[in-house]
Image: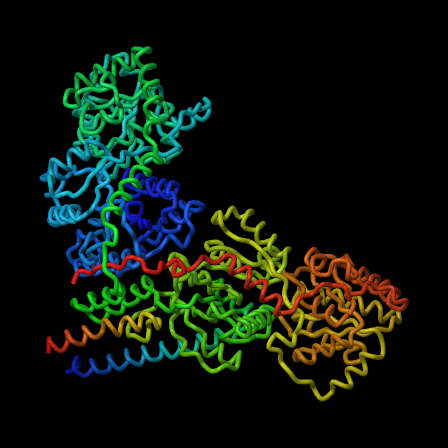
Amino acid sequence: MLIRRSRPNLMASFMRFLLARSVLASWGRQVFWQLPEPLRYMLRSCVSSRPSPPRRLASPSDLSPRAREIYARLHVSLEGTKKEEV
Amino acid sequence: MRIVIDMQGAQSGSRTRGIGRYSLSLAQAIARNHEGHEVVLALNGLFAETIEPLRQAFSGLLPQENIQVWEAPGPVRASDSYNQRRRRRAEVVREAFLASLSPDIVHITSLFEGFGDDAVTSIRTFSKAVPTSLTLFDLIPLHDPDRFLAPHPFMKSWYLEKLEQLKQADLLLAISDYSVRDAKKRLGAKIQRIVNISTACSEIFVPKQLSEVERHGLLSRLGISGPFVMTSGTIEPHKNLERLFKAFACLPAKLRSERRLVLIGKTEPSQRPILQAMRRRAGLSVKDLVVTGHVSDDDLVALYNSCELMVFPSLDEGFGLPALEAMACGAPTIGSRAASIPEVIGCDDAMFDPLDADDMTRVMTRAIMDENYRAELKALALERAPEFSWDKTARCALGEMEALIRERSNYGTEGYDIVSSCIEHLAGGELEQGEALQLAQSLARTFPARDHKRQLLIDVSELCRRDARTGCQRVTRSILLQWLKNSPGDIQIEPVYATLHEQGYRYARRFATGLSGRPSAGADDPIDYASGDIFFGLDYHADTAPTQMSSLMDMRLHGVSVHFLVYDILPVTKPSYFPLGTDSAFSRWLEAVGHFDGIIGISKTTTEAVQAWYADSEFSLSPDYRFSWVHLGADIENSAPTFGLPSDADELFFQLRQRPTFLMVGTIEPRKGYAQALAAFDVLWTEKTDCNLIIVGKEGWGTKKLVAKLRLHPEHNNRFFWLEGASDEYLNKIYASASCLLAASEAEGFGLPLIEAARQKVPILARDISVFREVAGVHAGYFSGSKPIDLAESIKKWLALYRENRHPKSDGLPWTTWEQSAKQMWAELLSRGRTSWRSHERSGANKVVLHR
């Protein structure tokens, strides 16, 4: 019983943690960019300039216009394959 | 004839081996001997790290736009069956790319690539009719398939598939007569046309007189003592090293004890125990055999020039390049009477039976003991080596290609759009969404849109996020505005930006709409780019370039030239003027910028300071790195100015008219000289010198005490004024009311206030620093000294001259407008950009018949 009751609580806590983390990160970014440049230098120099992570290709909106146009032409077959599988 | 050379032989894992050297040297020789033919290199973008070195290797031989890059999603190595579908797609992309370059012939530098890395080679799996030639090195794996092909489950099928593709080639350019004979024997009538174009060694292999110090340094570094016999090779059985070890062990005891056997060649750590076991079996002690591993080219030349004898005992070779390299250095060389080696050595007396260790011992002993014989071998080497030359090999290859094209003229039919066919072909296969997205991105980079207009991509990452109205941002705004207003029709001006939380740039179209007031040209999409585009880091932001290195490198490898504007490098030359950590952030930025194509400084002084910084930090810039400088504009009204005057403006102007007014413009920062200036005016006011001081500039950093002093100064709003938020319109009017611009800054990148003042004919009193001398020349008065009294005295002298109208006038100071400045910058960038490949497209070029 204990386990069954605690599972949803754990999940909810975890979801709240994720939400809070994302909100804080977003807020932090906004605040960071409002700081005067010298202060940003100081903060950035505390952590070395690490390369930005690669752009995630999750949907066509992550593509450039030319790539999106090509994707649309590739996608015709993708849709076709899915329908056949269904 | 347009010859497209697939350079993967010089990009793949083979690039450090003989195949890589051969591929690069042959392509360079073809480029050198092209005789009216057009040479285009095709590079695989999956070997990104090899692209810049290859571009450098062809600098001066080929225009950069003749080096084209294609890419497909990886990994694609054939040894992993999971890659199979990706590999097949990559083959289609590569063949379509090669066909899209409208070649008369495609030459493949090495077909047997891509088993253990991301090389992709195929012939006619997609494009059916492009005449194709390839370099045939050897078919050694067929000589002993159990050993070479059996160990890996996929190796055999992969090799056999490559053999089938080899039979599709229209022309095989073999590296020796032996390779020709061997291919004919094993593949018979299935090959279409085969010819020996021979080979050569690099021009670095020449006889060289080493000083005793050089020789001793080299040998002690590599652990070699005394005279030595040299060989090169790997532990592969056909290199016949074990028999050489035995032959060396059988040398007369005195000869053997006095000399070492030195083995040169890449040895994996896992191969060392095998090599040591071979040594033990042969009866050699640890000190008898020196294994150097891979050595640099310089060391290799020195070793060939230092050895007593070079022995090449191989049982099977496509050519035997090490023997030729040694001979070119004048080393006495003996080798096996097998495979292609007699073609190289060319003298039966210098050869032995490679299966007979005693014979090997006999010839080695003779070469060591018999001075005359060794002299003959040396003379033979120096006489024989020049018969092999890359130019000769390249001319032979070109002749064979020309003959093939004459026979196959008009090989295709017109009407196919190769890129559309490629996309249709790929769309026909199984494709998951993630794969389709990756593939679409690669295809977009490989095949830019037919109507892709050349772009000038202008980085405004900082300005489009926030306009802090700093000097850098005024420049960014002004130049960008001019380019948006006056761009020539054949180039698309595109402001772009990047963020720190993802790689890649986006079009800053919302920002551009806001700045220019023109209707929106679209959304802030990720950018497209193509060969011939130019990226210009106009806006300064310390972190953007270092964190976007990967995407900037990607652009560059696809033929986009990448340049940056440098405002100053004061954070590294005068770090004490800036907040803690600024210098390290700025150094990182300079290092990042140094990896690309060049900089434009805003003054000659700044540009020279950047050059000096790179020289001092021993940063390795590309030999083609460009430095130049362009002065900035003086017309504030053309820099997207801010407007508005406060209600008490007239009162201020009244005050300014009462006595001579000295104006200082700039952020309140330690380097700007405000503290010295204020103290100097305190001296003047105490001495009853009647004059005004007005400062226009926001509070910056590191000046808390000074700012408090400014706010509470007894002359505040009497003879001293500080305007923290003046609009550009207000500033313009203040310039007009000032008697003198006081430029007291101790260090600057340019000195914009000087030309802004000169434009309104306001006289200038400036600190004597090189950049102010560069900008104002004889049209300003100068002061030096860091004490308040130094400046006070200079101001008094200046005022005395002013009263007599003998002060230095700024009327003749040459200043540029933002329009002129933007035009100069534009011309400089265009002179640096690579020509777009599309301008090389041939009308009526051969179109390709596609495999359906």
| Residue positioned 15% across, 56% down in the render | B81
**Residue situated in front as seen by the camera: B486 or B813:** B486
Residue B833 x, y percent position in the rendering: 47, 58
Q: Count up the numbered dots.
A: 0
Residue A81 x, y percent position in the rendering: 14, 74
Relative side of B654 to B472, left or right? right
Residue B814 x, y percent position in the rendering: 71, 63
Relative side of B667 to B581, left or right? right
- The image quadrant of residue B109 is top left
Examine the rendered structure and indicate whether residue B780 appears above or below residue A13. Answer: above
- The image quadrant of residue B126 is bottom left
Examine the rendered structure and indicate whether residue B544 appears above or below residue B319. Answer: below
**Residue situated in front as seen by the camera: B590 or B346:** B346
Q: Residue most toward the right?
A: B804
Relative side of B676 to B201, left or right? right
Q: Is residue A9 visible?
A: yes
Q: Residue most toward the bottom?
A: B647
Q: Is residue B553 visible?
A: no
Examine the rendered structure and indicate whether residue B124 appears above or below residue B485. Answer: above
Relative side of B49 to B590, left or right? left
Image quadrant occupied by the C terminus of chain B: bottom left
| Residue positioned 86% across, 65% down in the render | B796
